[in-house]
Image: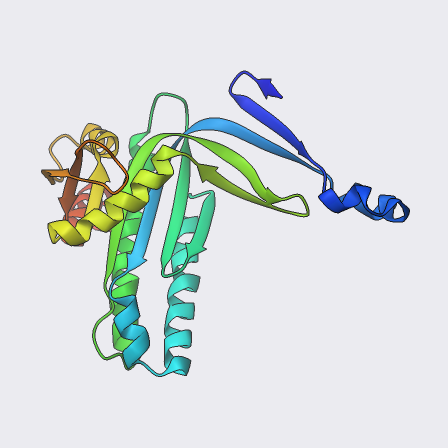
Amino acid sequence: LTFGQTEVEFYWPAQADAQESEDADCDDSATALLSVRRLISVMVVDIRDFTVLTRQLDEAILSETIGTWFHQAGQIIRDAGSWVDKYIGDAVMAVWFHADEQVSSHEVLQICQALSRLHKMTQQLSETFPLPFPLRIGAGVNTGYAMVGNTGSGDRPDYTALGDTVNAAFRLESSTKQLGKEVALAQATYHYLRAADPAGVLLEAHEVNLKGYDRPTIAYAGNFDDIDTFVRERTGGDT
C-alpha cells in the first residue's frame, strides 16, 4: 500500500500456512514493513588494507582490535546524531535523516565531527594494539533521497536505508583509493558543506567513474586534515 511517499508492506511468514496448529505463534511474527522516502546523508567508512591485516596479525589480536574499532565507531556515530549504523564486513555505514529539501549547518557539522573523531580514534588504536602497520580508514559521504524503513524477514525486521543514494556512498568510498585521498563527498553533500561555511574547507573536484554507473560523477575529495580544519573552525577548536 502507498500513502503519499510512504509504502507499507504486510509480511506473513511462508511457514504460517504450513502448520495451522501454530497459528498463535505465527501471529506474533507477522510484521508491517514501513518505508518512507526521506532526504538522508549516508557515510561509509572502510578499514584500509584489511585483508593484508588479517594475514599478518594474530587472530586474537585482530579480533580484539577490530571489535574495539567497531564498538567505538558505533558510539561516535550515535553521538553525532546518526539514526542508523550498520556493520558490513570491514566497513560501517551511518545514516542521518534531514528535513525535506534542506540539510542544516548543524547536521553538516555532526557528519564532519563523526569523520574527524573516527579518524582520531583509528590513530589511537594503532598505538594501543601491536599492529604490523598503522590502521587507516577511507570515507565516502552522499546526500540524497532514499527509502528508509524496516526490511529483512518478518520475525527479524531491520531498520535501514535503500536506494541509489546509499549505493553511491559505498562507491564514493571506493573512489578514494583511486584518487589517493581519504575522504570523498558527493556533489550534493559538498554543496551543503560549503553553504554551512562558504569560507571554510575547500576540497578538490574530481571526475570519477563509479562502478555500476554509466557516466562519470563529480566527487570532492580530500584528507581527514581538511575535515579536521572545518570542524575546528566551526567549533572553536573542539572536534
Kindly indicate the quadrant of the structure image that contains residue 103. Answer: top left
Task: For residue 44, say whether it is visible.
Answer: yes
Q: Tell me: 187 left or right of 167.
A: left
* Figure quadrant of the N terminus: top right
Is 25 on the left or on the right of 151, as rendered? right
Q: Residue furthest front?
A: 18
Identify the residue shown where x is 61% and y is 27%: 8
The image position of residue 113, as x and y in percent, is 29, 48
User: Residue at 29% of width from left, 67% of height from top?
Assistant: 50
Vertical arrangement, residue 113 with respect to residue 38, above or below: below
Q: Residue furthest top?
A: 4
Badge count: 0
At 38% across and 54% down in the image, what residue appears? 92
Q: Nearer the viewer, residue 83 or 163?
A: 163
In this view, the residue farthest toward the right is 21
Q: Examine the rendered structure and indicate whether residue 229 appears above or below residue 51.
A: above
Residue at 47% in and 42% down: 83
- In the rendered image, the vertical position of residue 135 relative to residue 81, given as above or below: below
Colour scheme used in the picture?
rainbow
* Residue 105 in the image, given as x and y percentages of width and height: 29, 32
The foreground one among 43 and 20 is 20
**Height in image: 54 above or below 108?**
below
| Residue 109 seen in the figure | no
Indicate the position of residue 28 as horizontal and vertical percent values. 78, 44
Q: Where residue 132 sits in the image (x, y, percent)?
A: 23, 79
